[in-house]
Amino acid sequence: MVSFTLRRLGAGVVLLIAISILTYSILFFSSANIARNLVGDQATEEQVALKEQQLGLDQPFLSRFADWFMSALSGDFGRSWFTSEPVAVAIANRLPITLTLVAVAILLTAIVSTLIGMLAAVKRGWMDRAVQVGAVIGYAAPGFVLAVLFVTLFAVQLRLVPPVSTISPGAGAAAWFTSLLLPVIALAINAVASSAQQLRSAIIKQLERDYVRTLRSRGIAEREILFRHVLRSAAPAGLTILSLQFIGMLGGAVIVEQIFALPGIGSLAVTATSAGDIPVVMGVVLFTVIIVIVVNLLVDLVNGWLNPKVRVS
């Protein structure tokens, strides 16, 4: 298990470096007018050149990237070029909102998709067909479309929840609940539809295995077979699906946070990208990749514990 973990960590480090280089390259070659935007249209060319020198925009790519990467390794992610706020502070203030949004959505997805997938796999009649039709409809509905519909119906027309986020420093649990309720559901519906279909197939495959017939022949209760044996055997496939859904939700959170005015890292990334704020964008990318690597590592470790064949492969 130690070598298995080290291999996964090594792959994660390589991925982190590769994405950092790729993202910095894109930002580097699209940063021509950043200094002009910072000093204003009325500034002289000398003032623009001075600002470029202060920001290091006059340095070659490798020099700039090496300076940023070495600083990031020491925990210094720089300051925002537009607000002068430390990047680490900006992300730390917004990351809990995004992580709470995605974590609750993935937990809801795991519970609901498991129940629906098991129900569809066991009840192979009209119930199975109804679940499959509902899954196709849910999968076809984009999360941002659902978010707009939820805001229009439940927030604007019915006024059951506020149309925009009320989360602020020191806000209570009620503000978090009302602000995250609709975004969580908007993110989870599509994920539930996809995960339920995959779990249904995995559970059906396990129910057709010889060991299930052997357990039934021994008189073991169907519920015990389903929950203790079948669900455990189907868990690796389900966890892999949920890890992919988690990554997708991080991307979907960018749009959902914009729609519901949630002050998370998704909205921070959009604002920083449109302004060309390279330190903030790189900080968001770095933290997001680290989160993805940690989640995938945890899923691999759980899968390796559930299925030793995974560790060998």
Image (spheres, rainbow, N blue to C red):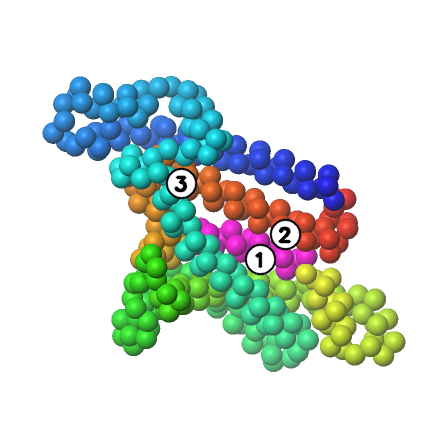
Could you say which quadrant of the image residue 114 lies in? bottom right
State yes or no: discs 1 and 2 in contact (Cβ < 8 Å). Answer: yes
- Which three-letter amino acid code belongs to the residue tagged 1? Leu
Residue most extreme to the left: 42
Q: Nearer the viewer, residue 298 or 230?
A: 298
For marks 1 and 2, give the one nearer the viewer.
2
Could you say which quadrant of the image residue 43 lies in? top left
**Would you place residue 197 above or below residue 96 in this image?**
below
Q: Main secondary structure of the magenta part?
A: helix
**SS at badge 1:** helix
- How busy is the neighbourhood of tag 3: few (under 14 within 10 Å), some, or many (20 plus)? some
The residue shown at (23%, 21%) is 50
Mark on residue 299?
Answer: 2
In magenta, the rendered stretch is 236-252
**SS at badge 3:** helix
Task: Give the mark nearer the N terminus: 1 vs 2.
Answer: 1
The residue shown at (50%, 58%) is 103
Task: Give the mark nearer the N terminus: 3 vs 1.
Answer: 3
**Would you place residue 12 above or below residue 25 in this image?**
below
Relative to residue 309, is residue 31 drawn left or right?
left
Q: Which residue is mark 1?
A: 242
Residue 175 at x, y = what percent? 35, 66
Q: Which residue is mark 3?
A: 88
Could you say which quadrant of the image residue 38 lies in? top left
Q: Nearer the viewer, residue 289 or 26?
A: 289
- Which three-letter amino acid code belongs to the residue tagged 3? Ala
Q: Quadrant of the N terminus?
A: top right
Residue 262 at x, y = what percent? 34, 57
Residue most extreme to the right: 218
**Would you place residue 109 above or below residue 249 in this image?**
below
